[in-house]
Amino acid sequence: MWKLRVPTPRTVWISLPTYIVDNVVSPIMSTSYGLCETLLGPAGNQFYNSLWEQAAAEGITAFVSSGDAGAAQCDADLQDAGLEPPGPALNGYTVNGLASTPYNVAVGGTQFNEDNWYAKYWNAKQRSGQFVGIRLHPRASME
């Protein structure tokens, strides 16, 4: 099984999954990033619908994270980009556009509730900005 850690620029978002599908690299692939349907736009939504349809036709199962923000995915995307102030959702119900096709398996995103005990659950001795889980986490009651 391949596990690739990639940055989030859109060029990588498009090129890496496309490479995996076009070259039938593995019968299973997992994508853990996304963008809400509204921000992805009609062309972006159609692109991923077609890509996951091609993957399914080739026998590739595409697992895609549904996101950590639940129904407030657009707000989370805008807040992460600094385009919306932190706070309650302002844009209504939205979902990850990469995970909303009939050809992928949308897998629930997980945001753990560590209660500021990060060292107990995460190993920060990896590369800068990356953490590896070292034990089971408590999850927020809503998940």
Image (tube, helix red, strand yellow):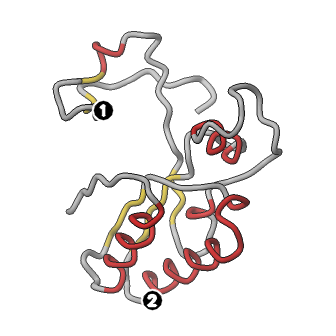
Q: What residue type is labelled 2?
A: Ala
The residue lying at 34 percent from left, 86 percent from top is 22
Taking 8 as reference, is 97 above or below it?
below
Q: Would you say the residues marked 1 and 2 are in contact, meaning their CB atoms lie under 8 Å apart?
A: no
Taking 129 as reference, is 2 above or below it?
below
The residue lying at 28 percent from left, 23 percent from top is 122
Q: Which residue is identified by label 1?
A: 129
Of the residues tagged 1 and 2, which is closer to the observer? Answer: 1
The location of residue 53, given as percent across then percent down, is 52, 83
The location of residue 108, given as percent across then percent down, is 53, 47
Marks counted in the figure total 2
The residue lying at 38 percent from left, 88 percent from top is 58
- 92 relative to 15 in the view: left or right: right
Taking 85 as reference, is 138 above or below it?
above
Looking at the image, the residue that sits furthest to the front is 83
Other-residue count near label 2 (Cα within 10 Å), few / some / many at <14 / 14–19 / ≥20? few
- 85 relative to 101 in the view: left or right: right
The location of residue 73, given as percent across then percent down, is 66, 46
The residue lying at 73 percent from left, 60 percent from top is 38
- 48 relative to 95 in the view: left or right: left
Which of the numbered marks, if any, corresponds to residue 57?
2
Place residue 17 in its image quadrant. Answer: bottom left
Q: Which amino acid does label 1 sit on?
A: Gly
Other-residue count near label 1 (Cα within 10 Å), few / some / many at <14 / 14–19 / ≥20? few
Which badge, 1 or 2, comes first in the chain's sequence?
Answer: 2
The location of residue 62, given as percent across then percent down, is 43, 69
Helix or strand or loop: what does disc 1 sit on? loop
Looking at the image, the residue that sits furthest to the top is 116
Which quadrant: the C terminus?
Answer: top right
* Near-viewer residue (7 or 18): 7
Helix or strand or loop: what does disc 2 sit on? helix
